[in-house]
Amino acid sequence: MLPKALVGLPHLGSHICDEWELRVTARCLEDDLKRPTDSNFEELTGIEIVKALVKDRSHRAIDTRRVAPLTCGEEVWVLSRGNDHRGATWHDSANRVVWLVACGRHRSGTSDDFFPYCKALDEDDTLLPAEQDYERLILDRDLRFAYAIRVEAPLVLKTARETPGEHNVMLGGQFGICLTVECADELESIAVAFRVESTEFEHVPIILQAFQVGKWEPATQMPSRPLAPGEFAFELIHVPAADRDV
């Protein structure tokens, strides 16, 4: 899953879909689209083949016609826009990305026709994403996670304040947590539990601070139950902003 707050929108170098993201390789950006390799996706949305990418690959990662034969052994699918705009997309299922790996004009028999061009890139081992593309993908995902958490955490906290009990929620499209909010006298206690096997520990401080800035302390249990095996938790006790002296 990808962050619900961003589904259907461009963010950094991607367009976010329900189950994957759409991206353009650096080689395709520079050579085919004549754009900088660090272009954000929103800057590309006026380009015809990028319009087709969003329209046709947001809900369908593959198509009916392949660019073939290819020596790379991967299934690369034809993307069409109008009479002669053509693109090639590859579903990188392991990383949940549909990449636009090449684009051009289709004019059969010409030296710059799209299909021979794709096959030449394949023979040169430059058709599929390169290391540079994955480096930027990782960076974008880290930045996206931080952004999504800042958007989602206040909404989750509001719900927890309004509805007593433990809330199991998914944050940033990838981290499941348990959250409780309890009030006593003028103090509010927020407890957050994580599962070891599904948590990237460097993201824990980002999540906690998105809920409430303050000094979080390790907790030995959740308010209504002991911690489950493989679970760890933090608690913050503070005076809610509405109750503070102004």
Image (cartoon, rainbow, N blue to C red):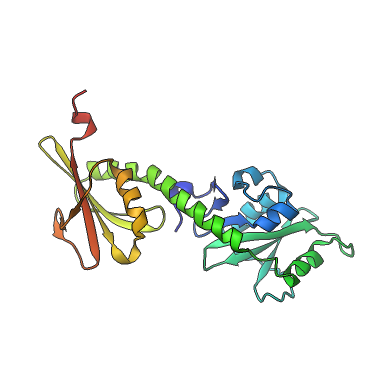
Circle count = 0
Q: Position of residue 64 (x, y in %)?
A: 68, 68
Q: Is residue 32 left or right of residue 7?
A: right
The residue under the point 60% across, 46% down is 40
Q: Position of residue 131 (x, y in %)?
A: 59, 63
Q: Quadrant of the C terminus?
A: top left
Is residue 242 shown above or below 162? above
The residue under the point 83% across, 62% down is 113
Q: Nearer the viewer, residue 88 or 197?
A: 197
Q: Quadrant of the N terminus?
A: bottom left
Q: Is residue 86 visible?
A: no
Q: Nearer the viewer, residue 27 or 103?
A: 27
Q: Nearer the viewer, residue 90 or 135?
A: 135
Q: Is residue 64 left or right of residue 2?
A: right
Q: Is residue 224 visible?
A: yes
The residue under the point 61% across, 58% down is 57
The extreme left residue here reads 185
* Residue 158, image quadrant: top left
Q: Is residue 208 left or right of residue 58?
A: left
Q: Position of residue 136 (x, y in %)?
A: 55, 55
Q: Position of residue 16 (x, y in %)?
A: 53, 52
The residue under the point 67% across, 47% down is 36
